Amino acid sequence: MRRSLGSRLSMLATASAVVTAAALLSPGSAAAAVQPAAAAAPAAVTATAAAPATEVIPKPVTSVAGQGTYTLGRTTRIVAAKAAAAAVGRSLRSDLRPATGFDLPVVTGAARSGDINLELGSPAPLAKDTSGEGYVLQVTSRGVTITAKTAHGLFNGVQTLRQLLPAWSASPTVRSGPWTVAATSVTDYPRYAYRGVMLDIARHYESPEAAEQLIDQASSYKMNTFHLHLSDDQGFRVVINGFPKLTSIGARASLGTDGRTSDPGGFWTQAQYRSFVAYAAAHFMTVVPEVDSPGHTNAIINSEYGDTDNPYLNSHPQDINCSLNHPPAWNYTGDVGYSALCPESDNTWTILSAVVNQLSAMSSSPYYNLGGDETPANVLAENRYAALVNREGRIVNVNGKKVMGWAEISGQGTKLASGSVAEYWNPASGADPDTVSAKDAVAKHMKIVMAPATHAYLDQRYTPTVPATLGQIWACEKGCDLDQFYNWDPSTYVAGVTDRNVIGVEGAVWSETLRTMSEVDYMALPRMLALAELGWSPKVTRTATSPAYQNFLARLGGQGLRLQAAGLNFYPSTEVPWTTAVTAGSPKLDRTRTIEGTLATVAAPGRLTSDLKVTVDWGDGHHSPAVLAGAAATGTTVNGLYAVQADHTYAHAGTHRVSITVAAKGLPSVTTSELVHS
Ligand code: TNX
């Protein structure tokens, strides 16, 4: 049943005041616990409060605030008795090193006061967690303990700990602390086993390094599956041994934008693919490869159509082409629904077998995604479509993988092993006749991953005109901002499809309009965080006016600082009460006792420099306004971090405490202070 296709084809347009870190601490409270900055520079002191536990995304199952504050310092050790825990410890060490400048040792033996202890065990609060991904996190003034049944659980606990640290801890460059965490006790485990993000590197090529950046983000929000859309009409992106033309021809270009016929292409070697899978594994994500079939195959067909000398093919590979075009023709637009591999061709099976065998062997997920979407009956009749899907499904199973595909694979005539997974992408909900693919999947004992385009397609615009130059609107003609992504429930979206069938949620980054990771990030962030929470956190009522949504937005307000500190691009949605934060720089005094350098750095997502009022108390009885410098927002980029600059000459030599206060309308002001010496 491919009923929704017509509608997509016709619609397809190508084309709170949350007080944050740094809040209001006077020197002498948290500031008393500061570390001096590097010896050569004048001592810099900052007052940055711990992020409240309530900022964590996805929201933990339970989290109870404790008494006091933990401070991570130069002498902190990461204690990991077992090898599997030590690997997680090393990843925490490398996460913390850039911003803190600390190279924390990962050690075995008994934990001492001040340590971060990673323990494998079976803590009683995790009795209900069957996933193995849960964890218990205890933060007290004396130390941090994370306990979990598996290394994956420890990793998830570490992600929570990272979010409890001040936002500046996400910075790729050294920032002044203090690195404090409010005491808390968290018990946490996932609602769904499958929490995915899909990246389409076929419409626009992305390098493995670029795609790894999305692993960093997705895994930090406890997503565990990376679905790689490797092939589509416009390109084929990974080397398949025996079929060099798939990449030498198939990867030459990407979909054309800005009036070009095509954009630059590219492909991954198998070594790069394997190292991507290893990178994902180190972040506890499995990789699901997808080579879409039988439709969306124009790149495969154009590559192999003339491959008459290939010893694996039978010298007339032209018979793979069941597209509307004879001979096949390259088409670098966003057109869909015209290409298909012929199920009757032996060459089709030689090629698909090599693809499935090689990708299955290199991939870590229990699933292999064979695609299966958008093959209209005028291209392949339903029985031929089903024949192809059924036979490819058996090849997948022989390779030890379960079949995954877009929900059309549940249609008439398909017969797939039970436990196969249909990814439901149609926007239709409730009892709408267009929900038929999800219902068919349930009837065929398949499992379901929910990715309805109106709530999970990360290429769709936030509003009909934002961003003006990126994104599609076919599913989101009225816009799909955070409210659309957060306020739905995977277990009730389609009538008759419940959590007995649904194994999780996926956000899909289709890349027809997205050429760079900065553009991907602008579309994916912050909406991916809404999907991460839907996949992980317990079921609650989520509507535009629900407390759950208001609470999510408030937490997201703090997460914006983290994204900004990390230097990531994202859309500063007007639905979010973004907060501000300031961290001390390390200015110096020159021979004339005049201050030089950046006084502080400000994170203020969505705000213009003119929205912010910055004042400096020079510590010698003088005050002055400061100037903010930094990149303004554009239609496809968030504003940058702002550098605080002001001139001052001290009358006398000595040590001065400089305080910088940032005020923004509607928000509590934030202050940091530092010592400067002459
Ligand atoms: C639909 S939904 C597609 C993709 C497009 C996407 C754009 C589905 C399985 N196919 O081919 O890239 O819409 O939003």
Image (spheres, rainbow, N blue to C red):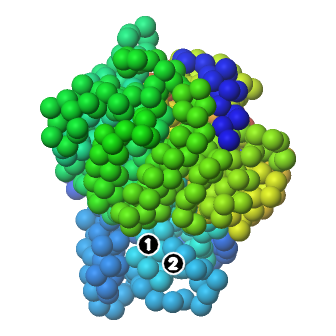
Residue at mark 2: 132
CA–CA distance in space, label 1 to label 2:
7 Å
* Viewer-nearest residue: 484 or 392: 392
Q: On the picture, is 79 further left or further right than 556?
A: left
Please tell me whether residue 2 is drawn above or below residue 159 in the rendered image.
above
Badge 2 crowding class, 10 Å Cα cut-off, few under 14, some 14 to 19, many 20 or more, is some
Mark number displayed over residue 152: 1
Badge 2 element = loop
Q: Residue at x 74, y 53 (%)?
A: 439
Residue nearest the viewer, comparing 27 with 267: 267
Where in the figure is residue 283, as x and y percent of width and height?
38, 61
Residue ID at (76%, 40%):
434
First in sequence, mark 1 or 2: give its number: 2
Give residue 6's position: percent from left, percent from top. 68, 26
Q: Amino acid at mark 1?
A: His
Location of residue 576 in the rendering, given as x and y in whole percent from the top left corner: 68, 40
- Res 574 visible: no
Contact between labelled residues 2 and 1, with CB atoms less than 8 Å apart: yes
Who's the residue at 63% across and 57% down the image? 448
Instruction: Tell me if 149 is positioned left or right of 94 in this view.
Output: right
Residue 81, quarter of the rendered image: bottom left
The residue at the point 63 percent across, 24 percent down is 9
* Residue 561 located left or right of residue 364: right
Residue 496 is left or right of residue 116, and the answer is right
Name which residue type carries label 2: Gly
Quarter where residue 105 is shown: bottom left
SS label for mark 1? helix
From the image, which quarter does the C terminus lie in? Answer: top left
Question: Where is residue 538 shown, x and y percent of the image?
Answer: 70, 66
